[in-house]
Image: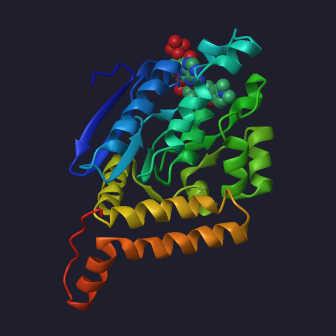
Amino acid sequence: MSYTSILTETHGRVGLVRLNRPQAMNALNRDLLAELCQALADFDADDGIGAIVISGSEKAFAAGADIKAMAEASLVEMVRSSFVELFDGLRRVRKPVVAAVSGYALGGGCEIALACDLVVASETAKFGQPEVTIGVIPGAGGTQRLAHAIGKALAMEMVLNNRTLTAQEALHFGLVNRVTPVERFLDEALAMAAELAGRAPLAVRLGKEMVNKAYELPLNEALEAERRSFYMLFATQDQKEGMKAFIEKRKPEWKGR
Ligand code: DAK
């Protein structure tokens, strides 16, 4: 598959998608999002891939939706645009997705990072929801996921007053998992993804699904779902193999079955 706004690579069992519109700080237009969505779906369907990394450049993860492309849009055009459906492509991915963020992660760029499962940030990463400065609000999950991730007070400040977070602040407030020197952020994200890709695939998939349920369901329903998923794993070969390997003091060999 040849793309114009992203680059894809595989590193062993890890699929890497790099956003690649350097002339526009990786601003998200329809083509870029459609390509991202396609690449994610392809990696998700590929049995040779166990985890995915989304990255930008050192300077910009993504500076948000392409303002030039939507400046003159009407309400109907915005409603009819596939922008949000494409964003939902990220939510549909069943394998773990790690965001490797360096530089600007603003607006829709911050929303992509928030929709990933884990985030590795370089020391230069800058997270923000500056939509209010151009007369709108976050529209792809920013208000909701930020409030869940960092709490109401700081989310309000970011959404209403364009407060940005440095990488260290983002680590402190629970928005990111790890901060690295700028020259290490991608390697660190790839290493984290490789580790995830080496684990029992069905357990990883259900673990991801269940953590996400914490944000989607009332506690009693989420606990029920967790218990059903736990029981379900006893029908897999990998559960038998994992526990047998522990007892035999050896490394398990996962089948994804
Ligand atoms: N869109 C288009 N072009 C952008 C851009 C953007 N978001 N960000 C940067 N660029 C372009 C600049 O226009 C410039 O292009 P030229 O003028 O050279 O042609 C080039 O990238 C380099 O940018 P700067 O010259 O501005 O570079 P600086 O280092 O001075 O500043 C910056 C970097 C990232 C701080 C600055 O560019 C900036 O503030 N960018 C805008 C950030 C922003 O406001 N982001 C939020 C966008 S709104 C939806 C749901 C959600 C959304 C949309 C729809 N639906 C429900 C349908 C999401 C909305 C957003 O994300």
Position of residue 250 in the picture relative to residue 35 (left or right):
left
Q: Ligand 1 is found in which quarter of the picture? A: top right
Q: Is residue 78 above or below residue 113?
A: above
Q: Position of residue 86 (x, y in %)?
A: 54, 30
Question: For the C terminus, which image quadrant?
Answer: bottom left
User: Seen from this angle, which residue lies furthest top?
Assistant: 72
Name which residue lies at 47% across and 63% down.
206
The part of the image, by quadrant, that contains residue 133 is top right
Please state which of residues 63 and 138 is positioned toward the viewer in this rendering.
Answer: 138
Does residue 123 appear anywhere in the picture? Answer: yes
The part of the image, by quadrant, that contains residue 148 is bottom right
Position of residue 72 in the picture relative to residue 53 (left or right):
right
User: Seen from this angle, which residue lies furthest bottom?
Assistant: 247
Name which residue lies at 71% across and 69% down.
219
User: Seen from this angle, which residue lies furthest front?
Assistant: 235
Q: Position of residue 38 (x, y in %)?
A: 40, 30
Name which residue lies at 51% across and 48% down.
116
Q: How many marks?
A: 0
Question: For the N terminus, which image quadrant?
Answer: top left
Q: Position of residue 113 (x, y in %)?
A: 53, 44
Q: Is residue 176 above or below residue 20?
A: below
Name which residue lies at 54% across and 52% down.
167
Please state which of residues 186 and 251 is positioned toward the viewer in this rendering.
Answer: 251
Does residue 63 appear anywhere in the picture? Answer: no
Please state which of residues 181 and 117 is positioned toward the viewer in this rendering.
Answer: 117
Q: Position of residue 40 (x, y in %)?
A: 40, 38
